[in-house]
Image: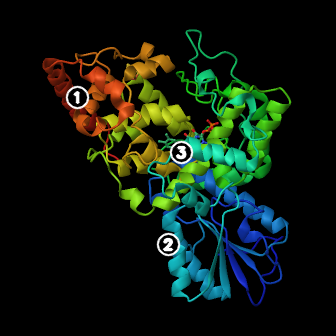
Amino acid sequence: MNHDTPSAMPLPTQVRNLVIVLGDQLDAQSSALQDFDVTQDVVWMAEVAEESTHVWSAKQRIVVFLSAMRHFAQDLRAQGLPIVYTQSDDADNQGTLALQLKRAITLLQPVALVLTAPGDWRVLQALRAVAAEHKLPLDLRDDTHFFTTVREFAAHAKGRKQLRLEYWYRALRQKNGILMDGKAPVGGQWNFDADNRESFGKAGPQNVPPPTRFAPDAITQEVIALVNTRFATHPGTLHTFGWPVTRAQALLALNAFIDQRLPLFGQYEDAMWSGEAWLYHSHLSCALNLKLLNPREVVQAAVDAYRAGTAPLAAVEGFIRQILGWREYVRGIYWTQMPGYLERNALDAQAELPAWYWTGETDMACLKDAIHQTLEHGYAHHIQRLMVTGLYALLLGVKPKAVHAWYLSVYVDAVEWVELPNTLGMGQFGDGGLMASKPYVASGKYIQRMSNHCKGCRYDPALSTGATACPYTTLYWDFLMRHETLLKKNPRMAMQLKNLGRLDAAARLAISNQAAAHRLASSAQGKTLP
Ligand SMILES: Cc1cc2nc3c(=O)[nH]c(=O)nc-3n(C[C@H](O)[C@H](O)[C@H](O)COP(=O)(O)OP(=O)(O)OC[C@H]3O[C@@H](n4cnc5c(N)ncnc54)[C@H](O)[C@@H]3O)c2cc1C
Ligand code: SF4
């Protein structure tokens, strides 16, 4: 354990609370730190290999966590908080949170453990077990970072046959007085989707502002060197690393987004373009999930831009819906459904994830672009995740757990409470419709409409059979056929099934055969990786 920096406070002789700060809890205002007493409490933080290896974590993701943790610990030390911090490369590092915590308890003999509710069910169980083993009280506190508690979500969900984002989101708008004119939504409507979600048209994106990136400082460089050595075989590269790793940087990124990108956020929320990773998205999910930013300040900044007339209502509402709506909603789903949620597989999907998801070595232009960008930056925007990488896995019939492991590995913003419902529920329909009212399925024509990918692709999104048939289009019809009986029960699938009904028996057979051949070819492509 490391307690050797010059500015470090001496540890109290008798430790009252050992305050656990996890890698995604980097908030000086967190509930765990609220009543911290420097004369009798100690902060405990640990970098452990388990958190980078329980899924095959991408290098960008490991660096963002470790660098942000080290910066946060440095700030706490500067404020005079006693802290024990274990680095990845410390000789006595035990490799797991549980083992490392046990060691700290033995050494420091605290009276109690204090913890803000973690983001992973797995981590909570591990820390609870350590507390029980040592017969120590664990003071588990609500995560006040969020607008809501899990209890509020459970109360909202109770007795409802279906959970829908819209009702939850409206209730939160009202409760928090966000974009409200008295009891009515500002602008007279709750949802401006009809004004949003355009494609870029033939000309493509024009004058997209450069993303707000940060050159690695000495701490980040040290972490990059460490990750390149210890996790050399993990996916992705680090030469482009530029994510915010401090609160000051996160605030700069927030301000730049509000000034430069928010006005066009809604309009191009769903659009994609080859080689354009950043577009008009905020790129703030990582800073939010590490808790460097508070969602209240992010939402308030967007509301202020609307009030100041610098961003239109449709863009501001669309952005706030993601944070106040979706982000709180998926957290509620995760914590009310775990641990069983992880095992759900409503469509009985049993295929393995193609190995090329870890390399991007595919001839499908849209997938190649999304995966390459993901490995390069640890980032892809929502529609790339849902309607390119997610859609292909859903149509192929990949096991939801394998898809989940990929998403949890490759994105800098991936923490299980937010990643799992998005992947298993929204992306793969693994929960059978708890999270989304129908499977998000489409043919290659959707990707053609929302991007320029198909122009540079050897496949044709209009074709479902033949040598140049787009695999999405083939697999889309095949998916509808494979799940026809189940999907017929869902009125929201009526139009898609009506179109399926137009295919005669010969066309159906040809599609099934082509889908089977594609499945074989797809699973054979690429190196075999974990
Ligand atoms: C299969 C799949 C996996 C995903 N995995 C993650 C994940 O691991 N971590 C993560 O934070 N988001 C995840 N998302 C949600 C969303 O794609 C990302 O939050 C978003 O792309 C991050 O980029 P951004 O910050 O530029 O977002 P923007 O497009 O600028 O959106 C603004 C903010 O809204 C929030 N947000 C937007 N959509 C969602 C959503 N569906 N659920 C929760 N919050 C949302 C994020 O905090 C985001 O920063 C996933 C979505 C899908 C379909
Ligand atoms: S043709 Fe199909 S595989 Fe190729 S880019 Fe378009 S949607 Fe993707």
- The Cα atoms of the two marked residues, 1 and 2, are separated by 42 Å
Residue 320 horizontal/vertical position (percent): 68, 39
What's the residue at 69%, 75% (across, down)?
Answer: 19
Residue named by callout 1: 515
Residue 471: x and y in percent read: 31, 25
Label 3, ligand 1: CB separation under 8 Å: yes
Mark 1 or mark 2: name the one nearer the start of the chain.
Answer: 2
Q: Which residue is mark 3?
A: 411
User: Residue 248 location, x and y as percent?
Assistant: 80, 48
Cα separation, mark 1 vs mark 3, equals 29 Å
Amino acid, disc 3? Tyr
Q: Earlier in the sequence, mark 1 or mark 3?
A: 3
Q: Quadrant of residue 306?
A: top right
Query: Can residue 96 be seen by looking at this rendering?
Result: no
Looking at this view, is 117 or 388 the one in front? 117
Q: CA distance from mark 3 to mark 2?
A: 24 Å
Q: Report the residue marked by disc 2.
A: 125
- Local secondary structure at mark 1: helix
Q: Is residue 105 above or below residue 360?
A: below
Quadrant location of residue 219? bottom right
What residue appears at the point 50 percent right and 73 percent down from the top-left corner?
A: 126
Residue 17 placement (x, y as % from top left) = 71, 81
